[in-house]
Image (spheres, rainbow, N blue to C red):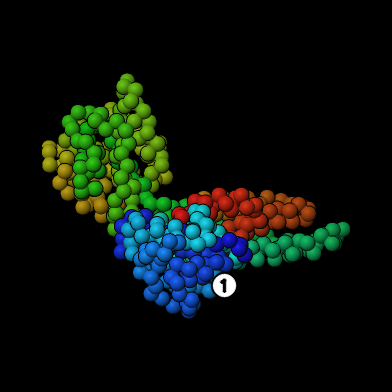
Amino acid sequence: MQTDTISAIATANGIGSIAIIRISGDSALSIAKKLSKKQDFSPRYATLSTLYDAQNTLIDESIIIYFKAPYSFTAEDVVEIQCHGGYIVAQSILKATLDAGARLANAGEFSKRAFFNGRIDLSEAEAIAGLIEAKSEDGAKILARQMKGSLKEYIENIRDEIIHILAYSEVSIDYAEEDLPQDLISQIENKLSKLESSLESTLIASKSREGLMQGFKVAIVGKPNVGKSSLLNSLLNYNRAIVSDIAGTTRDTIEEQVRVGSHLIRIVDTAGIRESSDEIERIGIERSLEAIEDSDIVIALFDGSRVMDSEDKQILSLINKHAKDKEVLFVKNKIDLESLFELKEREFDLELNSKDSVVSLIDALKSIMDKSNISDEIMLISQRQVSAVQNTLSNIHEAREPLLDQELEIFSFHLNEAIKEVSSITRPFENDEILDKMFGSFCLGK
C-alpha cells in the first residue's frame, strides 16, 4: 500500500450543482480534519462541515464522507468532499488539500491504487473507464456486469481449464519413455476443442458488438449533389453542413454525433465521390473511402430524380469493394421529384426526401444497431483484451501438433504461454510501465 496521499477533483470541469474532491492515502482523514476544524468523522456517514484554507479563510460549506481502509475504492483511507459546483470552489478546496499535505493525483491513479491493493483487476478497471464513456445503454449494461466481475469469472474458468490440461502433460512428462494412452490424448484434445470453441465465440460476439462500446460509425456516401449534406443536417436537426447546388461543395469529411434510440452514433458526411483533377477535392474523396472502411453502417445515397450514370456505378462498385462486411442501406433521395433512377440488381431499402422527413431512416438505423443488443454472452471491451484472447487461441492451436507427436515439453510450453496471455486480461505478469500507460488513459480523479 502506498503511503503518500493523493487528491483530485472527481467530477467533470464546469458549472454544476455539486463537485466532488476525492482524497486517498494515510493522511486523508487528517487533511479533512484540518480543513474542517472537526475531529470526529464516523466512517460512511455524511458530515456537514465548513471548510477553511491555509489562511483560515472560509471556502465553502460542504459534505464530508470518510471511508476507512480497507473499505474504500482504493482500499486506503478515502475522504470525499461534496461542495458547491463551479470553477472556483472546487479548485479552492483542491488547493487547500494540497497545502495540507496531499499531492495532485495523476490520471487514473485512484483506479491504479485500487488495482495494486487488490480491490479490482484490470478487466474491472477497464469496465469502469468504459462505463464513463459508454455510447449506448446496452453497452453500459455490459460494462456494469464486467465491473461486478463477470469477465473476471469467465477468464478464471478458462485459465483453470488450461492449468488442468497442463497438469495432465506435466505428470505424463515423467513417463516420457512410455506411449501415452490414446484415450488420454483424446481427452486432452476434447478439452482443447471446447476451450477453442468458447474463446472463438467470445471473439466473434465481441467484434460484432464493437459499436456498442465505441459508438456506431455511420458514413453517408454518394456522388456529388445527391443530398448527403441535407441528409446530415436533417439527422442532426440543424444546419451543420453547407448545402448548395454546386457539385463538390463538401470537400472533406464532416463528423458529428447524434443519439438514435439508445445509441450515441457518429455520422460522417463524406465528400462526393467522383473523378476529380482538383487536388483538395481528390484528398477529400480519399478520406471518404477511408470513412467507408472505418464505418459500421454505410448509407448509400442516390438521387432519384436523375438517371443512373457512370458516377453512380462507381459508387456501387466502391461499396461492393470497400463495404462487403458492413451493413449497407441503399437510399433513394428526392422522391418529391420525378423518379428516373433505378437500381438494376436490387431494391432500395428506403425512399425519402432528405429535406423533409428522415424518420424512416432513423428507424432503419435503430433496427440495425439494436441487432447488437445485450445478451448473456461475455464480451471483450478493449483491443488489449481481444489481442490477449487471439494470442491465447494461437498458442492452443500451436499446442495441438506436439500433443499428437507426444512432444509434451513443447506442448506444455505453448500451454504456459496461453495461460500468461489469458491471465493478462485480469492480472498480468507485466511491468509497471505498461500498467502506467493503461491507467494513464483514465480521466483525472478516477
Q: Can I make out residue 141 in this image?
A: no
Q: Nearer the viewer, residue 198 or 428?
A: 428
Where is residue 136? Give x, y as percent. 36, 58
Residue lying furthest top: 277
Left or right: residue 401 versus residue 377 is right
Residue lying furthest front: 55
Left or right: residue 93 versus residue 167 is left
Residue depicted at 44% across the width and 52% down the height: 210
Name the residue tied to disc 1: 70
Q: Nearer the viewer, residue 368 or 436?
A: 436
Residue depicted at 55% across the width and 62% down the height: 5
Label 1: how many Cα within 10 Å (few below 14, some 14–19, many 20+)? few
Where is residue 392? Give x, y as percent. 62, 54
Residue depicted at 50% across the width and 73% down the height: 67
Q: Can I make out residue 334 in this image?
A: yes
Left or right: residue 52 versus residue 357 is right
* Residue at disc 1, secondary structure: loop
Residue depicted at 38% across the width and 74% down the height: 48
